[in-house]
Amino acid sequence: MQNRPLIAIRKVRKHFLGKEPIFTDINLEVSGGEFIFLTGVSGAGKSTLFRMLLGLEKPDGGIIIFNGSDVRTLAGEDMCRHRRSIGMIYQDYKLLQKRSAEDNIAIPLQINGSPRNIRDKKIKDITRKLKIGKLLKQQVQSLSGGEQQLIAIARAAVHKPILILADEPTANLDQKMATRIFEVLSLLNSEGTTVIFATHDINLLKAHQKRILLLKHSVLVEVH
Ligand SMILES: Nc1ncnc2c1ncn2[C@@H]1O[C@H](COP(=O)(O)OP(=O)(O)OP(=O)(O)O)[C@@H](O)[C@H]1O
Ligand SMILES: [Mg+2]
């Protein structure tokens, strides 16, 4: 079917035991190719929403459709395929510290079972695109935070996911590096990858004319 949204979230509810309900009625449509900022105070549920999109957390009610499939009903190989179609980027990078940058970037390709020559070509492509050639052979623990985040983005993007979920990727970085991270994600977006970028960074939100979604009082509102 043409023109269907990439993501359709309808009437999603979630209530963790012993806490205030986190989502009472979340609704969202995202078209393929969009770049969206997701914001909201600490505890508003940004990471939980990402976990739901990945199928790591189930809503109490409502539906989450991704690329034509109801995420709640996926299991086994279908769930693995679903998760492989999403690239995750975290505030704390989640890289293997004692391995080289290149080894880390190769991980999704190893999981996919890509043959060696394809793996090498894809790593070369993303390295050139992100301009991280000088970092490739270095051990991750010797890299700065910003450099580690670039490697984490390369790992998330190397197998060309449909969607990148960036969970406060610039929270630990200075403004210059935050801008570089934004630009790298914008570049991937301009090549067709849908990006949802969770952030508290008011400077980034103000500096770029993007769709902004705000999680507040257990619902999701469009602020721009
Ligand atoms: N598995 C869980 N069990 C119980 N409570 C949870 C669970 N996961 C999240 N929560 C609660 O849900 C709320 C939202 O958490 P979440 O991490 O999604 O917020 P956030 O917007 O990402 O915050 P931050 O900006 O600090 O990263 C918090 O109150 C958190 O404690
Ligand atoms: Mg979070």
Image: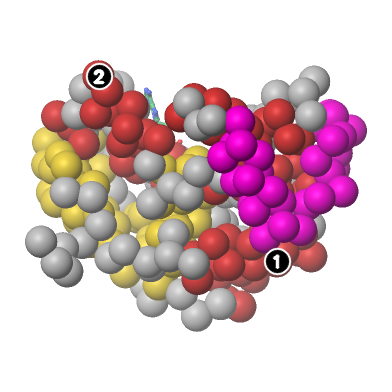
The residue nearer to you, when weighing 165 against 116, is 116
Residue 9's place in the image compared with 22, above or below, is: below
Q: Any atom of ligand 1 within 8 Å of the CB at mark 1?
A: no
Residue type pointed to by label 1? Thr
Give residue 109's quadrant in the image.
top right
Q: Position of residue 149 (x, y in %)?
A: 70, 45
**In the image, is residue 122 part of the stretch drawn in magenta?**
yes
Q: Which residues are magenta?
A: 116-144
Q: Dot 1 lies on which element?
A: helix
| Image point (50%, 56%), residue name | 197
Residue 76: image tag:
2
The quadrant in which the C terminus is found is bottom left
| Image point (28%, 48%), residue name | 218
Q: Which residue is mark 1?
A: 179
**In the image, is residue 65 part of the stretch drawn in magenta?**
no
Mark 1 nearby-residue class (10 Å; few <14, some 14–19, many ≥20): some
Mark 2 nearby-residue class (10 Å; few <14, some 14–19, many ≥20): few
Residue lying farthest front? 117
Q: Position of residue 58 (x, y in %)?
A: 24, 29
What colouring does the structure picture have?
A: secondary structure
Q: Nearer the viewer, mark 1 or mark 2?
A: 2
Q: Position of residue 16 (x, y in %)?
A: 29, 26
